[in-house]
Amino acid sequence: MTDMNAAALNRGKVAVLDATLREGEQAPGVCFAPHVKMAICELLDEIGVDIIEAGHPVVSDEIRRGIGVLARRGFRACIGAHARALRHDVEAGVDSGAGFLGIFLCLSPERLRDRGVTLPAALECAAESIALAKERQPGLIVRFTPEDGVRSPLADVVEAARVAVGAGADIISVADTTGSMVPGGDRSLYDWVSRFRERLAGQGSFPRIAVHCHNDRGLALANALDALRAGASIIDASVLGLGERAGIVDLASLLAVLSQDLPGSGSWRLDKLAELYRLVSHYSGVDVPVHFPVMGRNAFSHCAGVHSQAALRDPRHYQSLDPRPFGLRPELILDHMTGRTALQHALERIGVSGIDGELLSLVLERVKETGQKGRVVTLEELRWIIDYEKRSPPGLPARMTRTA
Ligand code: HCA
Ligand code: CU
């Protein structure tokens, strides 16, 4: 590992690997143009992720060239390439100019049987690939991933890790390729990583452990944190959790937990996340769900009268995350749930004063009516409502039908 590559990995106690450009492109229909990849990388780099997995060079010439451009761009983050444990893939990865190469190979008995390969032959293949990468470029950070590791026999994965480290791998990744693990149960990643590390330690091997968790059960982040607690120190994530099937760990949710709940795990420019999510959502064609943690439009909004009133006194009454580091603020929503307090607050925000008595009641009524149609009243629309109600003389039929 070169000093520069090592520095990229050691900046924080928890290293974050963003896989939006590799795993994310495995989400149906997602394909970023090379210049868009560059813009995404710029934001990821500013945010402070440690490794950017930028693609699988053998997939296309464009991906291979793109990785080279990104690698030469001089980011602080280390640019990574992905490879199967095949000479051709490894050579393409090395030639791409990446500073990090992730080599993966599935060792589960079922997959080996399917491919007609024995475990020793597969291990030899892994060792040759890792050794080749290191020989061709000694400064390269090499990660070896026994794909679907958590559903493979532990003894085989331990043996694979031993062989991989012997061949020069810097990092061993624990992959929950199918999102099968469940915290607190028989398939806890905390237990799995603990046992794995114990067995390796028993052989005098202490590789750096990464974790790659898929979200099939909605447990990717919980599992990744379990792995972290058991001693993993690199976590894979992607913007919006984009990836195969239900995707992987969502980057913004991960950074929210690391920065607000695990002090000392690192520091990141969280205020850049909103721009990153806007960009990735636009160019991937995948919307950010409104109720998505942290980056969803509703993530810091308060709706019911009781919530709005309490949140106005102190947002922490109804928020456990602080939106400010993300450049966000709590929002009081105007809809059918709105009470006078939230309305008064909205009036202050748009700089309207002197509205009380009957006019205030009329405006509130109109806001609630609009909300009952399943819409939220924006501050812009609130201005129009006020403007209209001010000009609407009392006692006219329109007003009578409205209140009827
Ligand atoms: C894949 C599988 C993978 C590999 C992870 C890794 C997984 O799509 O190639 O190389 O660390 O989930 O196991 O993403
Ligand atoms: Cu994956």
Image: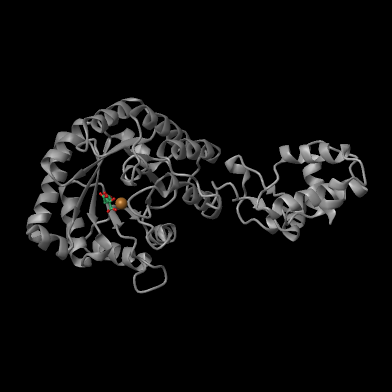
Left or right: 127 as drawn, with respect to 171: left
Q: Nearer the viewer, residue 94 or 170?
A: 94
Q: Nearer the viewer, residue 212 or 66?
A: 66
The type of colouring in the image is one colour
Residue depicted at 33% across the width and 33% down the height:
4
Q: Is residue 226 above or below residue 8?
A: below
Residue 72 occupies quadrant? top left
Q: Is residue 353 above or below residue 242?
A: above
Left or right: 332 as drawn, with respect to 177: right
Left or right: 374 as drawn, with respect to 178: right
Left or right: 130 as drawn, with respect to 308: left
The spot of residue 79 in percent (x, y) is: 32, 35
The spot of residue 308 in percent (x, y) is: 74, 55
Q: Is residue 80 above or below residue 243?
A: above
Q: Quadrant of the N terminus?
A: top left
Q: Nearer the viewer, residue 38 or 236?
A: 38
Residue 2 occupies quadrant? top left
The spot of residue 30 in percent (x, y) is: 35, 41
The spot of residue 232 in percent (x, y) is: 36, 56
Q: Residue furthest bottom?
A: 186
Residue depicted at 34% across the width and 54% down the height:
245
Q: Quadrant of the C terminus?
A: bottom right
